Amino acid sequence: MTQNLDVEGCTVREAAAEDTVCGVVPQQVAVPSDADSLSRVMAAAHRRGLSVTARGAGTALDWGWPPRSLDLLVDTSALSWIDHNAGDLVVEVGAGTPMADLNAALAAAGQRLSYDPVRLGGTVGGALATGVSGPRRLLSGALRDLVIGMTVVRADGVVARSGGRVVKNVAGYDLAKLHTGGYGTLGVITSAAFRLHPVPEALRLVSARLDSRIRAERALSALCETTVVPSAVELDWPASGPGRLDVVLEGTPGGLEARVAATVGALAPWASGEGPVVAEELPEGWGLLPAEGTVALVTAPPAQSVTAADWVREVSEAVDAGAHVRGSAATGALSVTFPPGTPADRIRLVVEGVRSAEGHPLVLLRAEPHVRAAGIDPWGEVPGLGLMRAVKESLDPGHRLSPGRFAGGI
């Protein structure tokens, strides 16, 4: 049954098929024009006991798991604004701001948010809600580490702020880290403040093809013994054939020469073919996950990242699942992508096989409908689940924010 949500500054309409969240169609869609109207519509939903899920550009609505109920979809796309303080290397931005717009605005001032998006067309709020960071998290930290302040609207409509717009102003509980990667289960993000970095003058990408796990491990070990301080060390481990290690170096043109030489020297003994190749730009699609198909995240201790990637390939080969592993070899955060339409029983065998190895937890970030329908556990064993449930109970005691989207059915 639809609700009469007459809220000042907020457009409310009947939901349509394109508003579906993991196969669940909401009853209504609310489009608040600003943070105040978002607060009012959340309060109205609270009084009526409605379940709510937030949406930015909608590029990650098929991430996570289907909500148990969904009465109201809150579209934050109108919360789009940028307040850039270039002198302090800080920006505050509305949750509905497209990441592309933010990056363009910062680049015009010679600065950047040191975060590689994993999806095209997403918004700042969506990036925060899903919380997955791309390759350059190695040097600058994950997206959540770049947040210095955040404003959210609670399930009852109350506006809550954490941190501030000054790097040294972070004090008390860092609630922003709870909301980053929380899939909107703890609150609706309205804006965030980030610390920034100057855009480096030059970049070099050193790539080496590696024919075996042993060679990849030795190449990575040799790289770790240098002092080159890369921005990213990305492992590409396809379903078959040789793998590749991509090392990103950033800095001044003069300062990069010795670092590139040291990187080439470390990788060359283990590389196949013509040896390491040096480029001055990142390839198209750098850091992006495929737009279709099931995607999982495997984490491992950095020293075991190559072993973990090779284990995924071994398990996948055994059941012909075609899994492709990419990710940060230096942080142990690896994505596993399956070709669209991969049968659910094969994905299930890979998921269970990878999880059977101690120290290689796997989470399904995005699952195709037939995979979700197969009843595969998307989260596996979740450390600290009791604490996570306690936080959920504290911030959303009615369990009305994206119920069931996150780990343990939170």
Image (spheres, rainbow, N blue to C red):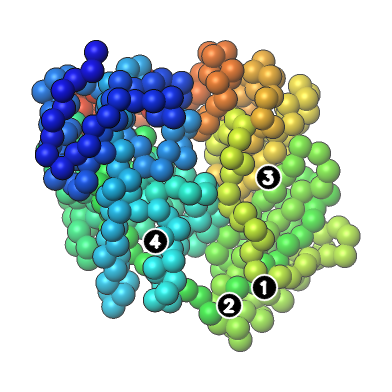
Q: Is residue 229 visible?
A: yes
Q: Which residue is mark 4?
A: 102
Using the numbered discs, state the Cα–Cα distance from disc 2 to disc 4 in whole angstroms: 21 Å
Residue at point 82% right, 59% down? Answer: 271
- Label 1: state its secondary structure: loop
Q: Which residue is mark 2?
A: 202
Closer to us: mark 1 or mark 4?
Answer: 4
Among the two numbered marks 1 and 2 on one chain, the one whose residue lies closer to the N terminus: 2
Q: What's the residue type where badge 2 is placed?
A: Ala
- Label 2: state its secondary structure: strand
Q: Quadrant of residue 99?
A: bottom left
Closer to us: mark 2 or mark 4?
Answer: 4
Residue at point 34% right, 25% down? Answer: 15
Q: What's the residue type where badge 1 is placed?
A: Glu
Q: Is residue 390 visible?
A: no
List x then y, in percent, for residue 219: 73, 58
Closer to us: mark 3 or mark 1?
Answer: 1
For residue 306, the mark is 3
Q: Quadrant of residue 394?
A: top left
List x then y, in percent, for residue 187: 24, 36
Taking 208 as reference, is 158 above or below it?
above
Q: What's the residue type where badge 3 is placed?
A: Val
Among the two numbered marks 3 and 2 on one chain, the one whose residue lies closer to the N terminus: 2
